[in-house]
Image: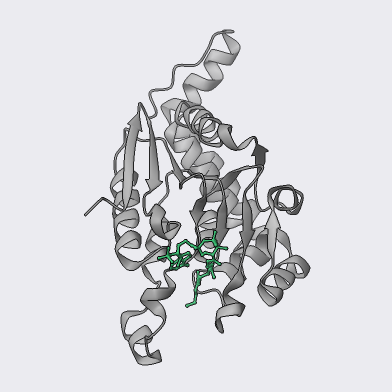
Amino acid sequence: MAELIEITREGRVALIRLNRPEALNALNSALAEELTAAAEALDADRGVGAIVVTGSDRAFAAGADISEMAEKSAEEMVEADFFAIWDRFAATRTPKIAAVNGYALGGGCELVMMCDFAIAGEGAKFGQPEVKLGVIAGMGGTQRMTKLIGRALSMDLHLTGRMMDAAEALRAGLVARVVPDDQVVAEAMAAARQIAGYSRPATRLAREAVMRAEELSLAEGVAWERRLFHRLFGTEGQREGMRAFLEKRKPEFHRD
Ligand code: HXC
């Protein structure tokens, strides 16, 4: 059987491509296991500074696998704690960029939102159409989307199940950049190379601090940020970055 994901390493960047094109990359349990295991292994590798997650031209991912779920009972879902695996993917600390072409629906859209930011092609389409299947989002969509784009638009998408195009997703703040379809992966890889070229503790803690903004009050978040900022003064990256600036040269980060 073909692998459900493909991993390519380019220096300090890893590209993970979802590889179930016949089902528009529907996220079944096997794919979730492979993707999470890969993300965790890359996360533990100090040689990896950023990860790009992408799909095919037609679909980033068209959602959780409906054929796998259709006949499950509530007891089975509870017993398996179905979808809990995605908490492990989301907990990986290496910066992750979603490079999105085509459909990112349901779990596919939720996977986009589990990444740290997204770069979309002009033809990308986003949505949470679970209501049409008699269910609701189950991989964090109602929570992450509401925090990302606000209640009005999140309600619209979750209650009507409509799709949002890339331009609307950009306006809404669901994605960070929109580029021509054929440049999505190149743009995401360039951003990943840039991130991976910086001091590793700086990018990890920047990510952690921004993520905390979704959980903490402003005062708590600012205090958290300040502590992380102080901590970075114990890193080689801080010494090198600031000295290089003062010496008017390019920094050479050894990534601590
Ligand atoms: C399983 C899927 C799938 C999915 C597509 N396929 N999406 N299989 N789960 N989520 C399969 C189709 O069955 C079909 O297989 C093949 O992929 C191609 O899809 P088509 O429908 O023929 O393509 P097209 O007509 O171009 O339509 C594309 C589409 C449509 C608009 C994206 O496939 C679609 O609406 N998919 C479902 C989107 C969705 O509802 N996602 C949310 C899932 S629930 P065959 O074998 O026929 O070729 C979810 C969270 C659930 O994500 C949380 C609750 C627990």
The answer, for residue 217, to whether it is visible in the render is no
Seen as rendered, the residue at the extreme left is 1
Where is residue 111 shown, x and y percent of the image?
50, 58
Q: Quadrant of residue 163?
A: bottom right
* Residue name at image x 37 percent, y 30 percent: 12
Q: Position of residue 147 (x, y in %)?
A: 66, 63
In depth, the one of 58 and 220 nearer the eye is 58
Residue lying furthest front:
22
In the rendered view, tell whether residue 161 sits above or below residue 48: below
Image quarter of residue 85: bottom left
Decide: is 94 above or below 33. Answer: above
In this view, which residue lies farthest toward the top? 248
Depth check, front residue: 108 or 14: 108
**Residue 72 can be seen, yes or no:** yes
- The mark total stands at 0
Instruction: Please tell me whether residue 81 is drawn above or below residue 242 in the rendered image.
Output: below
Instruction: Quadrant for the C terminus, please.
Output: top left
Task: Identify the residue at horizontal 38%, vertical 90% (top origin).
Answer: 73
Specify the quadrant that holds the N terminus. bottom left
Q: Give how far across and how far down residue 249 sits, in percent.
A: 54, 8
- In the rendered view, how is the structure colored? one colour
Tell whether 102 sits left or right of 199: right
Residue shown at 78% from the left, 69% from the top: 152
Residue 121 position in % (x across, y down): 62, 41
